[in-house]
Amino acid sequence: MALLHFMCSVTPLARAVRSRSVIVSSSRTAVTLSSSSTTATATATTTATATATTATTKTKASPPDSTVLLGMSEEQLQQLAIDFGQQSYRGKQLHHLLYKRRVKEIHEFSQVPLAFRTELQEAGWVVGRSSVHSSVVAADGTIKLLIKLEDNRLVETVGIPVTDDKGSVRLTACVSSQVGCPLRCSFCATGKGGFSRNLKGHEIVEQVLAIEEVFNNRVTNVVFMGMGEPMLNLKEVLAAHRCLNKDVQIGQRMMTISTVGVPNTIKKLASHKLQSTLALSLHAPNQKLREKIVPSAKAYPLEAIMKDCRDYFHETSRRVSFEYTLLAGVNDDVEHAKELAELLHQWGPGYHVNLIPFNPIEGTEYKRPYRKAINMFQSMLESRKITVSVRQTRGLDASAACGQLRNEFQKSPLVTPTIDDVQPEPESEPEPEPEKEAAVAC
């Protein structure tokens, strides 16, 4: 579709002929005419040309989503340059500007000829970077960013710095995959804010770039644990994963994809044979309790989830991490720990449990367990040979829980709409006004 835009721009004829557009190719098809059929063929040719002209005119008037540069590979950018009549090395320059220099606007591509920049802009191409609407900094150095997307919707991303004993900084970017979340887990702030739409691949990638800019440091780890359910947006999540690995150059083993469990998607993810970690949000050792905490669990029985996780391990040789949010008096008893250990042993090796002590939010009856209960739960798992860790609470004073900061800003619109802007959106419903949440750890 981007090539159709190029054909609509004012460019020399020779350059248009070099384009790989299907319309141009069809108009150049050689036809051998007999004298008796010349008139009919000429008429057909004229009609086809008129149709092609109309089609290109319509395309120019409505730029497609594919005109975003961010997220494209070096090979794709080289082909784009060729399609615009440029040498392929111009595509390498675009790649350098996007992923090394992190330039945000096409008119700032100083290394690229002005004519090429102009043609890209006239054809509807943009870099695909959004602005940071607001940010909150916690005392521990955690920073949450609220990014305003092109359609004025808000999405969160969190940067979590950790300094080791040698003084080296590990910077983790916790990225969102959806604007909101449709699964509405009972303890999650994101679900209370409603669901708007899936994020596009470049909208996920730009979160990592924004974190790097704020910290002035490279992101070393990426976790798809922010707003939304990654498996409900698997195509764009995989596109972002590829770009972060190949173009931004973050190792696959430094990335984790989280899910609460969506039927048939773990198998699909396993088929890609990524070297990234799969993190399953389990939160309960049995089906009955899990359904109370995670409503969507009714459609995906625990036995089926465990089988898919076992198959994922065998397919990728990468262990599965089980996220377990400890809720006082609900799932934090030592008997729950015993049951969890039995469940994991039943389905084989290659598992790790990440315990997440809950931090209370307004509008929920759940409470954070006492430290003694957390320690007993951990000890019970370790005594049964289960690898376990307790996630450190970060960003407690920065509304770092997924959905917290976004919910605070949803009580008033980002922009004041005009009469022309107030149009009903098809296949979309307005988000309910959420309650303002207290801060919990990311």
Image (spheres, grey):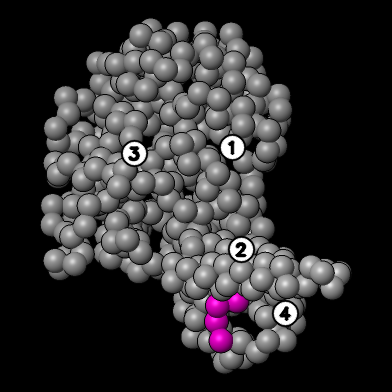
The tag earlier along the polypeptide, 2 or 1, is: 2
Give the Cα separation between the discs numbered 1 and 3: 22 Å
Give the Cα separation between the discs numbered 4 and 1: 47 Å
Q: Is residue 32 above or below residue 208?
A: below
Q: Are marks 2 and 3 in contact (CB under 8 Å)?
A: no
Task: Check disc 3 and report its element: helix, strand or loop.
Answer: loop
Reply yes or no: does residue 82 show up in magenta. no
Q: Quadrant of the N terminus?
A: bottom right
**Rendering coords of residue 125 (x, y %):** 51, 73
The tag earlier along the polypeptide, 4 or 2, is: 4
Residue where numbered disc 4 is placed: 17
The tag earlier along the polypeptide, 4 or 3, is: 4
Residue type for callout 1 = Thr
Residue where numbered disc 2 is placed: 72
- Viewer-side residue, 239 vs 40: 40
Reply yes or no: does residue 7 show up in magenta. yes
Give the Cα separation between the discs numbered 4 and 3: 46 Å
Residue where numbered disc 3 is placed: 181
Q: Is residue 389 left or right of residue 19?
A: left
Residue where numbered disc 1 is placed: 277
Residue type for callout 2 = Met
Give the Cα separation between the discs numbered 2 and 1: 24 Å
The tag earlier along the polypeptide, 2 or 3, is: 2
Specify the segment rendered in magenta.
Answer: 6-10
Q: Residue at x 46, y 13 (%)?
A: 301
Give the Cα separation between the discs numbered 2 and 3: 27 Å
Question: Is residue 43 at least partly visible in the picture?
Answer: yes
